């Protein structure tokens, strides 16, 4: 059974959390769950009795992910707690901005098709064509 596409995951998230709104595309991109896992997260969040915040949705989805991985999904440090030189702090800020815009670039702008949804080009090593052996050119005989 093939994995759900981004559009299919987004539709399942919208069904599971109809009041969630703008956080759903990010959930669909980040968490490549099947329908049953998405429904389970939706039920857990519905039990709160109020529309969940973006942080609550991410925490619930992360908790589902880490149940199987055996690790905590929570960051060890807040970004403001890092003490870095200005150049490295700027690089971290650029990385955070890129990750925060990944859903838009990947799915709304369409790069997911070219990058095979996971960030790897379609010509990734697992799909590479066989290498051609180099052979010297033969000069035409006169």
Image (tube, grey):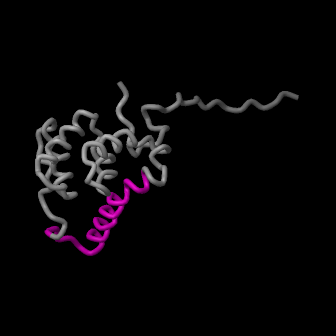
Q: Is residue 126 above or below residue 94?
A: above
Q: Residue at x 30, y 51 (%)?
A: 24
Q: Residue at x 19, y 55 (%)?
A: 51
Q: Nearer the viewer, residue 108 or 118?
A: 108
Tell me where residue 54 sits by quadrant.
Answer: bottom left
Q: Residue furthest top?
A: 1
Horizontal placement of 48 versus 122: left or right?
Answer: left
Q: Main secondary structure of the magenta part?
A: helix
Give the quadrant of the C terminus: top right
**On the picture, is 6 further left or further right than 20?**
right
Is 1 placed above or below 47 here?
Answer: above
Q: Name which residue lies at 28% across and 65% down.
A: 92
Residue 36 falls in which quadrant of the image? top left
**Residue 74 placement (x, y as % from top left):** 13, 53
Percent across and percent down for residue 139 are 78, 32
The residue range painted magenta reads: 81-106
């Amino acid at each position: 059974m093939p994995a759900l596409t981004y559009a299919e995951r987004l539709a399942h998230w919208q069904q599971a959390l109809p009041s969630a709104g703008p956080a759903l595309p990010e959930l669909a991109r980040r968490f490549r769950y099947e329908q049953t896992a998405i429904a389970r997260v939706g039920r857990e969040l519905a039990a709160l009795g109020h529309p969940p915040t973006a942080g609550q949705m991410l925490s619930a989805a992360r908790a589902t992910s880490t149940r199987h991985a055996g690790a905590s999904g929570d960051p060890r440090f807040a970004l403001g707690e890092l003490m870095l030189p200005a150049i490295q702090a700027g690089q971290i800020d650029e990385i955070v901005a890129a990750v925060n815009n990944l859903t838009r670039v990947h799915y709304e702008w369409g790069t997911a098709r070219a990058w095979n949804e996971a960030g790897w080009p379609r010509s990734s090593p697992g799909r590479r064509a066989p290498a051609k052996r180099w052979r010297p050119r033969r000069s035409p005989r006169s």
